[in-house]
Amino acid sequence: MCGPAARRMRRADPYDPGMLAPATSAYDLVLALHIIAVVVAFGWTFTLPVVYIVAARVDPRSLPVLHRIEYTILRSILNPALVVLIAAGIFLASDGHHWKEFFVQWGLGVAIVIGAVVGAVLIPAAKRAEESVRRDLEGWSGGEFQAGPDYLAAVRRLNIVGSAASLLVLVTIVFMAVKP
């Protein structure tokens, strides 16, 4: 056989040294998915302090809806992305035989801790913040807004726990990059 058909058949031969290897492997694709899950789960959280400062200064009436957006995103975006992140991490650790390495154990532990903290602390605190600031705004008629103690306590909890979770994410990224 000669001509283009013969050349196509030669390229299809897996034992032909001239055949091109796939550009990516399953490991590479799952690694990309793992990184995407980190960005989707946690990227937006680093903007929250700025969002709340601007909202409080420009129009405090926006605070209840922002807290509702916060816990809705935690529940409907962060949690599913965390599941994808953990599943992809399990595949990567298994495929690469990395289970004994510190960065894998650290990453899995942090992902589980953050998932628990989101469900046990951050979502309930965001709901309490929404409810309390809504009550505080009912009596507000303009001028300088003074949030009540319940709102301030909920926001303090969100800030402290959220900052700790963000720090864990950043430390985990460093550990994943340097693989100590």
Image: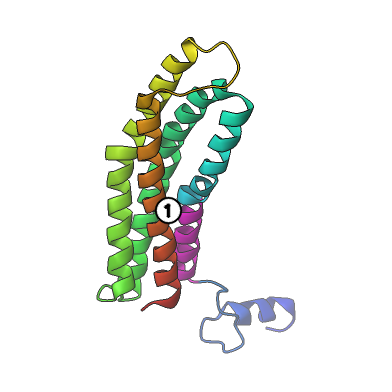
Front position in the image: 12 or 101: 101
Task: Give the labeled residue for mark 1.
Answer: 166
Q: In which quarter of the image is the N terminus?
A: bottom right
Give the image location of residue 140, x and y in percent. Answer: 52, 13
Horizontal side of 73 relative to 104 (left or right) equals: right
Horizontal side of 172 relative to 140 (left or right) equals: left
Q: In which quarter of the image is the C terminus?
A: bottom left
Corner quadrant of residue 172: bottom left
> At 48% from the left edge and 69% from the top edge, which residue is drawn?
28
What element does badge 1 sit on? helix
> At 36% from the left edge and 62% from the top edge, which residue is drawn?
89
Is residue 54 visible from the viewing direction of this image? yes
Give the image location of residue 96, x and y in percent. Answer: 35, 75
Which residue appears farthest toward the right when viewing the image? 3
Give the image location of residue 175, x and y in percent. Answer: 39, 71
Q: Does the magenta stretch include residue 139?
A: no
Residue 166's place in the image compared with 54, above or below, is below
Is residue 90 visible from the viewing direction of this image? no
Horizontal side of 5 relative to 42 (left or right) equals: right
Colouring rule applied to residues: rainbow
Horizontal side of 90 relative to 145 (left or right) equals: left
Corner quadrant of residue 87: bottom left
Which residue appears farthest toward the bottom when viewing the image? 17
Main SS, magenta residues: helix
Q: How many marks?
A: 1
Amino acid type shown at disc 1: Ser
Q: Give the range drawn in magenta.
A: 25-39
> At 47% from the left edge and 11% from the top edge, which residue is drawn?
138
Q: Is residue 32 magenta?
A: yes
Residue 20's place in the image compared with 121, above or below, is below
Corner quadrant of residue 18: bottom right
Front position in the image: 120 or 107: 120
